[in-house]
Amino acid sequence: MSLFDRFRPKWQHSDPAVRATGVRSLDDQTVLAQIAFEEPVEAVRLAAIERLTDQRTLTRLACRSDSAAPAALRRLSDRSQLAAVALAAERPEIRHLALERIEDSVVLHRIATSD
């Protein structure tokens, strides 16, 4: 533990376990998004994703080849964002999981004809 850790917010602590705990108490979507995209430790990224509610940010995370993509996909509730993931995710298994959650036949047809 560094001397500066005493003065930083928990989500900026040098210990990843403390950072993850600190992230779980955050509500600021901008800070959570930054952590989800830039944090090197997966457990801390996942903690940030669990607190994210911004659907566009979750879509961007789900479309990446990152190991946290499934967690971001699970947090998505907006149907248009699910369709975006089904069309644009880098990982085929994420596209398939998003597709399974879409019930609108028009959207499914559009995806089937464009994929």
Image: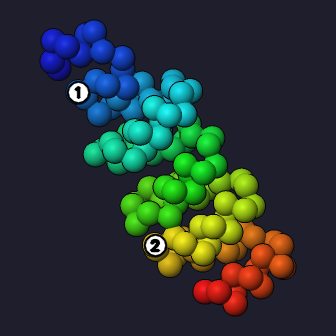
| Side of 55 relative to 105 (left or right) | left
Q: Which residue is found at the position 46% from the left and 74% from the top?
A: 91
Q: Quadrant of the N terminus?
A: top left
Amino acid under disc 1: Ser
Can residue 43 be seen here?
no
Q: Is residue 51 left or right of residue 15?
A: right
Q: Position of residue 16 (x, y in %)?
A: 29, 34
Q: Is residue 94 above or below residue 34?
A: below
Q: Residues within 10 Å of mark 2 (few under 14, many from 20)?
A: some
Given the current orientation, which residue lies at the most extreme bottom position?
A: 113
Q: What residue is pinned by disc 1?
A: 14
Label 1: element kind: loop
SS category of the residue bearing label 2: loop
Q: Mark 2, mark 1: which one is toward the viewer?
A: 2
How far across and down, in percent of the image, does residue 72 sit?
A: 54, 54
Mark 1 closeness class: few <14, some 14–19, many ≥20 residues within 10 Å: some
Q: Is residue 7 above or below residue 94?
A: above
Q: Quadrant of the C terminus?
A: bottom right
37 vs 70, nearest the viewer: 37
Q: Position of residue 92 (x, y in %)?
A: 50, 78
Which labelled disc corresponds to residue 76? none
Which of disc 1 and disc 2 is earlier in sequence? 1
Residue farthest toward the right in the current orientation of the protein: 105
Q: Along the line of sight, which residue is nearer the eye, 10 or 87?
A: 87
User: What's the residue at 42%, 24% (across, down)?
Assistant: 22
Q: Which residue is mark 2?
A: 90
> Farthest residue toward the top?
7
Instruction: Tell me the kind of residue under disc 2.
Output: Glu
Residue 23 vertical position relative to residue 107 in the rendered view, above or below: above
Q: CA distance from mark 2 to mark 1?
A: 31 Å
